[in-house]
Amino acid sequence: MPVKLQPTSVIKLRLGIEPNGRVEHYAATVCAKHMDKYVPFREGNLADYRIEGNKIIYSPSATDYAQYIYRGISKNGKPLNYNKDKHPLASSYWDKKMMTAEGTDVIREIQEFIGR
């Protein structure tokens, strides 16, 4: 019995693993959910985000200062101190901190999604 192979692009599309496909969208959603507790905020602008394809887009009102908060350095080049009383896990490089702490869970959730 002959075996008919599908092109890689067809297989990727069927699985949802093509660029900007449903798996990348789901991965961004899972990462945003897990990162939320690591994202510093004072008034909540960085806590407001939306998912577009495989990207997490933070509130447009936060874009002028988000890069400084992400790096943990003020516009003047001084280190930022995050309010740990109200938001104990808040830190700079929150995506990296989240993946270090919760990366295994994130990967498991994405793998379960692909396996459905």
Image (cartoon, helix red, strand yellow):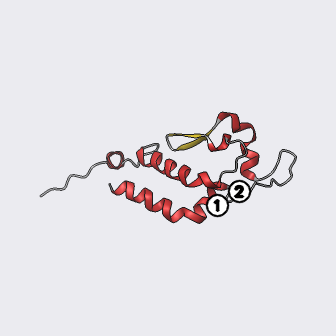
**Where, by quadrant of the figure, is residue 102 drawn?**
bottom right
Rounded to the nearest angstrom, the CA distance separating label 2 from label 1 is: 8 Å
Q: How many marks?
A: 2
What is the three-letter code of the residue carrying label 2?
Ser
What residue is rendered at 41% in x and 45% in y? 22
Residue 97 is tagged as 1
Q: Which residue is mark 2?
A: 91
Tags 2 and 1 touching, CB below 8 Å: yes
- Along the viewing direction, whichever of 52 and 102 lies nearer the viewer: 102
**Where, by quadrant of the figure, is residue 63 drawn?**
top right
The secondary element bearing badge 1 is classed as: helix
What crowding class fits label 2: few (fewer than 14 Cα within 10 Å), some (14-19), or many (20 or more)? many
Q: Is 80 located above or below residue 21 in the figure?
A: below
N-terminal-most mark, 2 or 1: 2
- Along the viewing direction, whichever of 37 and 56 lies nearer the viewer: 37
What residue is rendered at 49% in x and 40% in y? 53
Name the quarter where the N terminus is drawn. bottom left
The secondary element bearing badge 2 is classed as: loop
What is the three-letter code of the residue carrying label 1?
Lys
Q: Measured from the top left, where is residue 40 in percent x and y?
A: 70, 50
Q: Residue furthest top?
A: 60
- 74 vs 47, left or right, is right
Q: Is 107 located above or below residue 27 in the figure?
A: below
Q: Measured from the top left, where is residue 29 in percent x and y?
A: 50, 47
What crowding class fits label 1: few (fewer than 14 Cα within 10 Å), some (14-19), or many (20 or more)? some
What residue is rendered at 37% in x and 55% in y? 114
